[in-house]
Image (cartoon, rainbow, N blue to C red):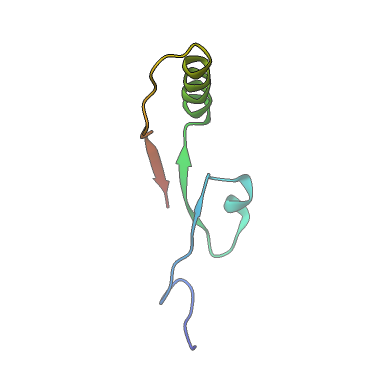
Amino acid sequence: MGKTLPKDLSVVGFDNIILSAYSTPSLSTIAQDRYQLGFEATKLLTNLLEGKEVEKIKVLQTTFIK
């Protein structure tokens, strides 16, 4: 198609995997707080098991790493 990276097209990863630091050209990625993700998942599961009402949608903070 005659396109070149990064001039015409960008690739963005998600989850800030360790390999993104070693790619050429560098890979922009979205990072999320894994601790907070686990905490919220545990809280959700605990509330479900206890029969409590749970939030249907939970939005967590992410960070764009260029």
Residue farthest along the top direction in this orientation: 50
Q: Nearer the viewer, residue 41 or 26?
A: 41
- In the image, residue 52 lies at what x, y percent? 42, 14
- In the image, residue 32 lies at what x, y percent? 46, 37
Residue farthest along the bottom direction in this orientation: 2
Above or below residue 11? Residue 46 is above
Above or below residue 10? Residue 61 is above
Residue farthest along the front direction in this orientation: 51
Q: How many labels does the image show?
A: 0
- In the image, residue 50 lies at what x, y percent? 49, 11
Q: Which of 48 and 63 is in front in this view?
A: 48
Left or right for 54, reference 25:
left
* Residue plotted at (59% across, 46% down): 17
* Residue plotted at (52% across, 21% down): 45
Above or below residue 27? Residue 56 is above
* Residue plotted at (39% across, 41% down): 63
Left or right for 60, reference 39:
left
